[in-house]
């Protein structure tokens, strides 16, 4: 059984006010932008295409939410709005994988936490899109860092459930979701306490049994469709058929090896999540062509004897060995994903090629998620999901995201933090004025 | 019966006994004898033996006379009394039996000191029994002899390792009560107690106490310190007849003058205990860990007496790739080196006794021999088992040697059991055999013999080639190997294959030595018995060896003459990346760099930095290089002051939160600084040079903070930032009102922000009253004062008095505006100011009020939304506070984040356009000002400490790496050296793993002892990576 890909975001709303300078918007809540009403030319920017290097001082034209031309002296359709971005950079929208965004607002407040269906170890049936909050105050703080699209994952025990992929702006999944069902996420049992750890052994058996049961169920169901339905095993059909990804969280070398063998045994299309020790298993990962969502570069080394900069340089080590990887912005929580480009930058400081680093937060995650036909690079025919930055997006003082477009829609870049900043700067100014009067 | 009291003398501890020497007659008892009285004369003679009378005093072919339980005579020319039972012990060795100073013996019936109760909610009060101490972990009033019941099973375990005298108390809790000294002989407690009042013992571990306090090591230390102060006060106040409570726990210690046996689980805690002993002028004897070699010099400086466990770490598992990933370099090193610890301590001139406590899976005697093999002299080893513990326990005039008049506690061994695998045959306690493993002499049947069976001649060969008796039976060229060979005092039994395969079987031999002849019967496979007699063969083959000669006990023998060769390195600290030789201060000139001064000079391009004698000499363009100065090419590099973290929890042992009580100003992070923490090295790799180690945020008034420089490789005391004013952690909001602690935590005051204010106010009022009381006492006329009991010292209130007097400064965890304003108001009312609000995520809302008050603000760069009180946190916080005139910094509260605080500072440029120099100041001069150390560090200004970082790029860039980190003009980290250290450590680890794999010969594993106390043997490594943050409430 496979789930057909669903494409949202193609309905065009009537022309409303375009907020091209959204920072001036007075609204304290950010309203999703209207569908692109007229062609837009980003003129003279340096295009960080990812797929075709950097095109200095080049124009990019998009219309109806799609990139229609890239080059110089482009022929402009009537009504094209020209935005001068000379001296600025244009990037494809960044893609953050492995996030809990929209599933949690304040982690310590239980009522706002929909991250994990902890009532059971095996919850393949749960699907992240069913709980996503598009009004989360956190989302605007992420997307104004150029992150347009995220993978949202459930957080439970062994078989964790089904992630989904969404843009960070929209009214609901109806217009913002990119993929409602994005494979299956597993957490590989721990090995840290040694092979004798009974609980971990039991968990391995549980996982194996579940996959075998699901296979048996699906085979039986094919011969006899009238058999009673098991929601859990139905949910596993696309990954057992190898049509969708199986994301497996595994950091320790032993976990990685076991997970790869397991994926091979059940014919899974595996993506390794975490991969802290992936640099020890590069041969295996390249031979099996398994891509990695690599543990946040700013993580602490796991072992006390590890090189102090091991996590900083793991990305560079994987790249040298030919392993394909995306970079994980944060293994926990939701708010820290805005640091995704800086995490990539940190890996560059420790030897990663800057182009590979950029690819690891754009095109590679798009390929892993199977949406590279739509985004991940600046190419004609791809969606106009992109942003403009005053400078290098991977460094703190140069990142200056001035405009973000998702499917050609202009995104309001304001957020809760900027609102508070304005409010209390006003307080400060008034106090200072009052003091001066005295 | 035998009671000792202790008198502390100047110099070594010496105890005298009330027992009159020479009064060694049979014990007088009160217990009625209900059977026929036993009036056998108890006179025993051991002759022809090697007698080790005392360490270093050996008599070959000696005779020992025991009369009524005591040594009556010992020597080579000793008359053997006619009424004696004589044991001839040719080839055997007699040792004085061992004295075990640290055990739980005969207290099995008592159960845990504090019963375990299931509780629905946390209970902060301790359970009381009589007028005892408030804390369940303190039961110094217990006199363990009162609960003593001799236990044959426990006694046998002790006797098997040669122990005749044991000092016993419950090894449970912080002040554990007073032990007693007993013989391991059978008998009533009345008969075997040697000293009813032994030593008090103590530790930093609360044992069976279910009371929450203390939950951390620093809490335990504070409790020990306060208790010892209370003891002095109780003694003085009682003497002066002051109206004070009755307290049996304090009274027991107030009357005590002996040393306290203080159990330490690692060498750093030994040093911690040592500091308390010196501070409180109370003598401690330290129960060690065999990790002392890791920090030998400061331990030596304590001039300690140790009780050393004869337990060594198990061989780490390195049998699989996965296992080698899990094992750390310090674990591997400790496995290799721990057995050499006793020899190292001997070489350092440190006195120690051995204990069998904390043996782990090891065997006492095997470990003893290992220690000797590793260079411990046999005389010191024997002293550590006999005379040293006897002296320690005040029973040296009775036990520990075999001198005349001492109790006849002795071990008869096959040979020198200190050096070789020679078995203990028997242990005698007070002149009676208490343990008989084997008779003194078995008949020695080895040799070659002729025998005749049914008219045929055979030859029998018996030997001990591999230790146990084995042999063969031959006829012509046919040779059968014997099985089941056993021998005792006079009988020899074995089996031999007999006859052909078709009609053969097994012949059973059963022989007995009668006089000089060995004869007996063989039963052949057909059931027929035949008499046999062994006739020694005329010529013994040369290769037939006698019983292996017993190892000689030689005084001063240093065991293995060749020094042990180690694969592992000794480094400072004893972790990966440690220095073999500590780096030294250098004079350096960094030339042509971009220098960020964090000072009025701003950023200087193409400038030089001159460092001499640990201080900055000059900063400027075109400086002259004085003679002998090392020049570093700084072109393309950036130089900044060392990064300072206002809020860190790294390098702290066992708990950053004494999160139990609402006020814990008595606890001190400075007591638990852990120099052996890899987080220090990792932080140096990010350019960090100075950190404030803060207590956690689990209570409104937390513990005292510590400020250290990250001088990797130096011991804890040398990390401390000298001359810095005291600081302390306070906390507000959700953590202290236990909002997110779960349903069990609803009973502690406060549960609201309102309550937080009230408890703080109450504590400060108490401190004011306390100060007044002490001031009044100090103001008394001297004559009156000498007759007046001093008020009790309270270390908790003293810290608060220091705050009121502005000699200690508050760093307060805080988030929301209401509570920030509350604390500033309270402080102003009480006449001091809040030094720094740390975390202060809503500082931007009250920035102008903070500026007016004079409080600094130290914030997270961009954390928010992890709990309700931080939902309004914004990353522009720094800019708003800075613009309002608040001294603003960015902190880490994280061993991870502190490694890139330069980037955390850069976020203020990113989010709110802060000037770059101001942004860098967020992690240099501003935190220095908050810590009141800005006259010493935080900027590159002549005269300040030479703490600086050389970066390979703009220091606020994500791409920048700290290439070199200098503290006091000493290079503690460089990328270049890091690469060398990584290669060195990798090779060392591989070599150690190979050594283990090579050691893993297919010999049988030593059997585990039944009572494995693995958990008491500390792996030296686990704390090295322990990660804490404010919210960590677990301790051990």
Image (tube, coloured by chain):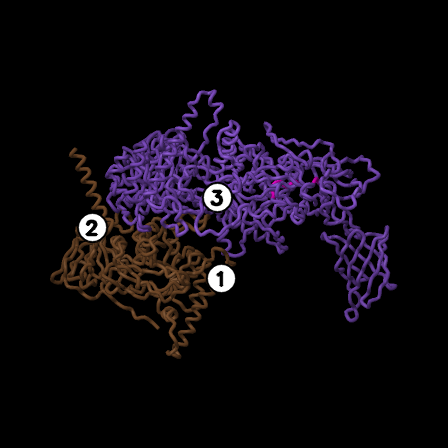
- Residue B82 position, x and y percent, is 84, 39
| Other-residue count near label 1 (Cα within 10 Å), few / some / many at <14 / 14–19 / ≥20 | some
Residue beneath the point at 36% across and 67% down = A125
Q: Nearer the viewer, residue B159 or B328?
A: B159
Residue beneath the point at 24% across and 44% down = B913
Which colour is chain B painted? Answer: purple
Up the image or down, B121 lies above or below B889; here it is below
Q: Nearer the viewer, residue B1000 or B518?
A: B518
Q: Which residue is mark 1?
A: A201
- Which range of residues does the magenta coloring cover? B95-103
Up the image or down, B355 lies above or below A299; here it is above
Residue beneath the point at 46% across and 35% down = B717
Q: Which residue is mark 2?
A: A87
Q: Chain of mark 1?
A: A
**Are tags 1 and 2 found on a single chain?**
yes
Q: Chain of mark 3?
A: B
Chain drawn brown, letter? A
Is residue B97 covered in magenta? yes
- Residue A172 position, x and y percent, is 25, 62
Whether tag 1 and tag 2 are in contact, CB under 8 A, the answer is: no
- Residue A155 position, x and y percent, is 37, 59
Q: Which residue is mark 3?
A: B126
In the picture, residue B124 is in which quadrant?
top left
- SS under mark 2: loop
Query: In the figure, is residue A321 to the left or right of A196?
Result: left
């Amino acid at each position: 059984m496979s789930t057909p890909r669903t494409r949202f975001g193609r309905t065009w709303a009537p022309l409303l006010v375009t907020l091209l300078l959204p920072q001036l918007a007075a609204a304290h809540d950010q309203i999703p932008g209207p569908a692109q009403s007229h062609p837009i030319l980003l003129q003279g920017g340096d295009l960080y295409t990812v797929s075709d290097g950097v095109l200095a001082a080049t124009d990019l034209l998009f219309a109806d939410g799609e990139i229609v031309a890239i080059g110089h002296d482009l022929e402009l359709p009537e009504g094209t709005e020209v935005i001068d971005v000379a001296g600025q950079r244009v990037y494809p929208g960044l893609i953050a994988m492995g996030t809990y965004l929209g599933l949690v607002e304040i982690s310590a407040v239980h009522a706002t936490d929909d991250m994990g269906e902890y009532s059971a170890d095996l919850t393949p049936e749960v699907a992240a899109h069913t709980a996503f909050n598009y009004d989360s105050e956190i989302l605007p703080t992420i997307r104004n860092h150029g992150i347009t699209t995220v993978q949202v994952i459930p957080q439970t025990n062994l078989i964790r459930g089904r992630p989904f992929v969404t843009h960070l702006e929209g009214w609901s999944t109806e217009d913002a979701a990119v993929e409602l069902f994005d494979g299956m996420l597993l957490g590989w049992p721990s090995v840290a306490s040694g092979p004798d750890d009974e609980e971990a052994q039991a968990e391995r058996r549980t996982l194996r049994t579940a996959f075998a049961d699901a296979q048996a169920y699906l085979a039986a169901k094919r011969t006899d469709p009238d058999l009673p339905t098991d929601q859990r095993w139905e949910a596993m059909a696309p990954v057992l058929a190898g049509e969708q990804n199986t994301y497996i969280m595994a950091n320790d070398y032993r976990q990685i090896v076991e997970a790869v063998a397991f994926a091979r045994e059940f014919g899974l299309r595996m993506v390794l999540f975490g991969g802290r020790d992936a640099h020890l298993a590069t041969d295996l990962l390249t031979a099996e062509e398994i891509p990695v969502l690599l543990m946040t570069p700013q993580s602490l080394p796991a072992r006390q004897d590890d090189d102090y900069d091991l996590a900083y340089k793991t990305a560079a080590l994987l790249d040298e060995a030919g392993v394909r990887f995306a970079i994980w912005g944060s293994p926990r929580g939701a708010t820290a994903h805005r640091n995704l480009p800086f995490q990539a930058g940190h890996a560059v400081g420790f030897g990663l090629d800057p182009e590979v680093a950029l690819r690891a937060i754009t095109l590679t995650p798009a390929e892993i998620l199977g949406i590279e036909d739509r985004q991940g690079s600046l190419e004609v025919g791809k969606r106009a999901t992109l942003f403009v930055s005053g400078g290098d997006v991977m460094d703190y003082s140069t990142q200056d995201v001035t405009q973000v477009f998702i499917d050609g829609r202009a995104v309001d870049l304001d957020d809760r933090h900027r609102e508070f900043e304005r409010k209390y700067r006003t307080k400060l100014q008034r106090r200072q004025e009052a003091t001066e009067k005295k | 019966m035998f009671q000792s009291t202790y008198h502390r003398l100047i110099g070594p501890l010496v105890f005298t006994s009330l027992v009159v020497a020479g009064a060694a007659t049979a014990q007088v008892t009160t217990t009625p004898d209900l059977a026929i009285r036993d009036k056998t004369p108890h006179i025993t003679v051991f002759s022809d033996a090697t007698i080790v009378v005392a360490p270093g005093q050996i008599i070959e072919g000696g005779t020992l006379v025991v009369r009524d339980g005591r040594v009556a005579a010992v020597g080579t020319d000793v008359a053997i009394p006619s009424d004696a039972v004589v044991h001839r012990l040719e080839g055997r060795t007699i040792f004085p039996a061992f004295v075990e100073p640290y055990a739980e013996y005969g207290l099995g019936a008592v159960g845990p000191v504090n019963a375990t109760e299931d509780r629905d909610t946390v209970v902060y009060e301790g359970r009381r029994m009589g007028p005892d101490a408030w804390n369940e972990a303190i039961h110094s009033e217990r006199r363990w002899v009162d609960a003593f019941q001799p236990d044959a099973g426990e006694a046998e375990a002790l006797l098997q390792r040669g122990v005749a005298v044991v000092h016993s108390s419950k090894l449970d809790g912080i002040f554990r009560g007073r032990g007693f000294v007993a013989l391991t002989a059978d008998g009533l407690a009345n008969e075997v107690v040697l000293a009813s009042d032994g030593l008090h013992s103590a530790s930093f571990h609360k044992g069976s106490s279910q009371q929450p306090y203390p939950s951390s090591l620093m809490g335990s230390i504070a409790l020990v310190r306060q208790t010892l102060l209370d003891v002095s006060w109780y003694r003085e106040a009682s003497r002066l007849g002051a109206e004070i409570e009755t307290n049996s726990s304090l009274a027991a210690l107030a009357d005590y003058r002996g040393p306290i046996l203080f159990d330490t689980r690692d060498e750093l805690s030994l040093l911690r205990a040592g500091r308390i002993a010196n501070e409180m002028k109370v003598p401690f004897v330290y129960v060690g860990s065999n990790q002392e070699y890791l920090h030998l010099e400061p331990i030596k400086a304590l001039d300690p007496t140790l009780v050393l466990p004869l337990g060594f770490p198990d061989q780490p598992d390195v049998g699989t790739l996965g296992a080698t990933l899990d094992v750390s370099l310090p674990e591997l090193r400790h496995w290799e080196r721990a057995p050499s610890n006793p020899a190292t301590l001997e070489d350092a001139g440190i006195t120690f006794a051995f204990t069998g406590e904390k043996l782990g899976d090891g065997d006492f005697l095997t470990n003893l021999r290992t220690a000797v093999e590793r260079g411990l002299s046999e005389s010191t080893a024997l002293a550590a088992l006999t005379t040293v513990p006897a002296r320690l326990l005040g029973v040296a005039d009775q036990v520990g040697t075999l001198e005349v008049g001492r109790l006849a506690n002795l071990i008869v061994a096959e040979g020198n059991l200190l050096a070789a695998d020679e078995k203990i045959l028997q242990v005698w306690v007070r002149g009676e055999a208490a343990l008989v493993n084997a008779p003194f002499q078995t008949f020695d049947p080895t040799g070659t013999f002729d025998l005749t069976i049914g008219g045929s001649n055979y030859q029998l060969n018996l030997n001990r080639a591999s230790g146990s008796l084995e042999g063969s039976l031959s006829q012509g060229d046919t040779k059968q190997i014997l099985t089941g060979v056993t021998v005792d005092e006079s009988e020899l039994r074995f089996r031999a294959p007999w006859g052909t395969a078709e009609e053969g079987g097994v012949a059973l031999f059963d022989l007995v030595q009668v006089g000089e002849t060995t004869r007996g019967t063989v039963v052949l496979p057909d059931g027929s018995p035949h008499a046999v007699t062994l006739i020694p063969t005329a010529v013994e083959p040369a290769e037939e060896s006698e019983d292996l000669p017993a190892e000689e006990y030689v005084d001063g023998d240093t065991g293995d003459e060749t020094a042990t060769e180690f694969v592992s390195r000794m480094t400072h600290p004893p972790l990966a990346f440690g220095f073999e030789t500590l780096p030294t201060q250098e004079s350096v000139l960094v030339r042509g760099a971009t220098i960020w001064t964090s000072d009025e000079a701003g950023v200087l391009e193409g400038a030089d930095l001159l460092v001499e004698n640990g201080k900055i000499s000059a900063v400027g363009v075109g400086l002259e290089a004085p003679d002998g100065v090392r020049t570093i090419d700084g072109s393309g590099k950036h130089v900044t002051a060392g990064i300072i973290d206002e809020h860190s929890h790294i390098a702290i042992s066992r708990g950053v939160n004494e999160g139990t009580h609402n006020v814990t100003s008595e606890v001190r992070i400075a007591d638990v600084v852990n120099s052996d923490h890899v987080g220090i090295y990792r932080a140096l790799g990010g350019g960090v040079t100075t950190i404030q180690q803060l207590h956690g945020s689990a209570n409104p008034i937390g513990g005292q903070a510590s400020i250290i420089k990250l001088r990797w490789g130096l011991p804890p005391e040398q990390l401390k930032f000298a001359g810095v004013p005291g600081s302390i952690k306070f906390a507000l909001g959700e953590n202290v009102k236990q909002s997110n602690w779960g349903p069990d935590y609803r009973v502690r005051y406060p549960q609201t922000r309102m309550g937080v204010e009230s408890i703080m106010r109450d504590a400060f009022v108490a401190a004011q009253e306390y100060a007044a009381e002490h001031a009044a006492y100090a103001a008394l006329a001297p004559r009156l004062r000498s007759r007046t009991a001093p008020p009790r010292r309270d270390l908790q209130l003293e810290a608060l008095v220091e705050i009121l007097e502005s000699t200690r400064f508050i760093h307060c965890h805080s988030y929301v505006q209401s509570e920030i304003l509350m604390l500033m108001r309270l402080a102003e009312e009480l006449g001091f100011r809040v030094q720094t609000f740390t975390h202060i995520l809503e500082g931007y809302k009250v920035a102008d009020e903070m500026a007016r008050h004079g409080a600094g603000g130290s914030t997270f760069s961009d954390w928010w939304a992890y709990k309700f009180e931080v939902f309004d946190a914004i990353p522009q916080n720094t800019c708003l506070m800075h613009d309002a005139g608040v001294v603003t910094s960015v902190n880490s509260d994280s061993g991870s984040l502190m490694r890139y605080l330069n980037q955390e500072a850069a976020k203020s440029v990113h989010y709110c356009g802060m000037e770059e120099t101001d942004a860098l100041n967020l992690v240099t001069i501003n935190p220095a000002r908050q810590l009141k150390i800005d006259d010493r560090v935080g900027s590159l200004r002549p005269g300040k400490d030479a703490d600086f970082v050389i970066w390979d790029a703009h220091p606020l860039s994500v791409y920048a790496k700290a290439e070199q980190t200098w503290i006091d003009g000493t290079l503690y980290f460089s990328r270049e050296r890091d690469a060398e250290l990584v290669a060195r450590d990798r090779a060392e680890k591989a070599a150690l793993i190979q050594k283990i794999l090579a050691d893993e010969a297919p010999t049988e594993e030593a059997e585990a002892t039944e009572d494995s106390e693995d958990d008491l043997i500390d792996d030296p490594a686990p704390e090295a990576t322990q990660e804490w943050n404010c919210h960590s409430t677990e301790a051990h």
